[in-house]
Image (cartoon, rainbow, N blue to C red):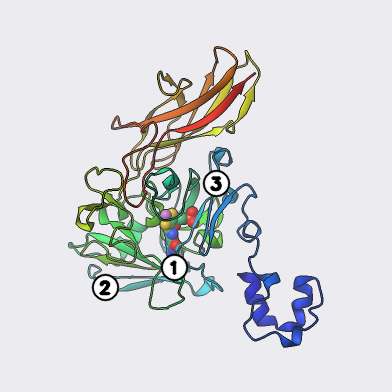
Amino acid sequence: MKRRNFVKKTGLGSLVGILGLDIVYGAKIPENYTLLGLQDPDPFQMFDKDKEMVVLNSKPWNMEAVAHLLDDRITPNKYMFIRNNGLVPENIDVKKWSITFDGESVKEKKTFTLEELKSKFAHHTYQLTLECGGNGRSEFDPPAKGNQWTIGAVGCASWTGVSLKDVLNEVGIKDDAVYIGYHAADQHLSRDPNKEPISRGVPISKAMMDETLLAFKMNGEDIPLVHGYPLRLVCGGWPASTSGKWVNRISVRNIVHDGEKMTGSSYKVPCNPVAPGEEVKNEDMCIIESMPVKSLITYPKSGAMIPKGKKLNIRGHAWAGELEISRVSYSIDFGATWSECSLEKPVNRLAWQHFKASISFPKSGYYEVWARATDSNGVSQPMLLPGWNPKGYLNNACHRIAVKIS
Ligand SMILES: Nc1nc2c(c(=O)[nH]1)N[C@H]1C(S)=C(S)[C@@H](COP(=O)(O)O)O[C@H]1N2
Ligand SMILES: [Mo]
């Protein structure tokens, strides 16, 4: 993106430097034409991502991690998945950035500059789990349209910002407020300025929780552009689609927010279980709120080879939306028997929890290690797949790795 802008601004004279070659017929290049040599920029370089990350889509950019990349306790930027619905904003002037609070249920419309936001309200830092509602979609059968995420659309970075609650209290909200909806600076893929790529939100009760942030830092630094610089909403434990990036307006609503991807069947699952492939009417679909219990084995990498007689130390993370994890178990016999992992408390509410186990294998051969987490309500992950749903959301099946003992 940056490079394309550069071309427009600098004109043909500087192109030699960019491509490293003389463009022989440069004078004949039509206006606004992007040279093939400058198209398809390297997304890993452009977004500071590790080369092992997997690109699912380039229009818009979507990228996921693989399990072993998520081994860190705090997910660094280079391993954080990217989910864009539209075009990443360009040419952001951070000094001019502001956020406006409007909607039926504000006492008065109010705007804060980013600087005011930072100086007026207390700063908080929390580690918050963000998982795309469609993470795991690729496993569903019949398949669902959309990004075919495997397991890597999740991360737990450290976010710093102000509590949305503090700002809403300063703005003043009316008694009839039921929902907030975000609006952001990214462009619709059609570039139609009257269309928003996404405008979602959360009930006022979630908006008013301490950990719901208007964040300006990720892992102690300015949020990377693709993750919402300079300001994003972070609603840990809920579908990450509720965590609006590049947010510049929040509407306080007296109805369930009806912005883009709040209505129809987006981010909704059948209110009651349905058979695979069944058609579900919109009125029988419910908005996804807190994400379900889930876990990932982040060490070792699937396919690990272990010498006979040696124990295998596995580790990973588990999370359960608004809830805590109470237990993580592992199985080496395809779920027939389970043993306990040791489990840490979360560093704060809505952060993933770390587990580990030391595993002995009875003899040489091929094994799979499966992990299964249980939340504080006693609900465990399904072993192979949860109930099917039309849009392929909420696949929280057990994660599995292959291990060879030789
Ligand atoms: N403005 C804006 N916010 C957005 C999106 C978007 O396309 N535009 N995508 C949402 C979705 S669907 C997800 S899963 C998360 C992804 O956040 P990340 O790219 O920082 O990992 O951002 C959410 N916030
Ligand atoms: Mo998402």
Left or right position of 169 against 401: left
| Near-viewer residue (239 or 392) | 392
**For the residue carrying disc 1, how many other residues have a C-alpha within 10 Å: few (<14), some (14-19), or many (20+)?**
few
Q: Kindly check if marks 3 and 2 are in contact, taking CB atoms under 8 A apart as contact.
A: no
- How many marks the image carries: the answer is 3
Q: Residue furthest left?
A: 176
Residue lying at 57% horizontally and 48% vertically, measured from the top left: 79
Q: Quadrant of the N terminus?
A: bottom right
Q: Is residue 335 above or below residue 18?
A: above
Asked whether the viewer can see residue 44, the reply is yes
Dot 1 or dot 2, earlier in sequence = 2
Image quarter in which the C terminus is found: top right
* Residue 386, placed above or below residue 248: above
Q: Quadrant of ligand 1?
A: bottom left
Left or right: 397, with 230 as reference point: left
Amino acid carrying label 3: it is Ala
Reading the image, the residue beneath label 3 is 65
* 115 or 66, nearer to the observer: 66
The answer for how far apart the CA atoms under marks 3 and 1 are is 36 Å
Check disc 1 and give the amino acid type.
Glu
Name the mark on residue 116. Answer: 1
Residue type at mark 2: give it: Glu
Q: Which residue is mark 2?
A: 108
* Mark sitting earlier along the chain (3/1): 3
Query: Which is more N-terminal, label 2 or label 3?
Result: 3
Of tags 3 and 2, the one toward the viewer is 3
Residue 202: % across, % down: 30, 56
Give me the C-alpha separation between circle 1 and circle 2: 18 Å
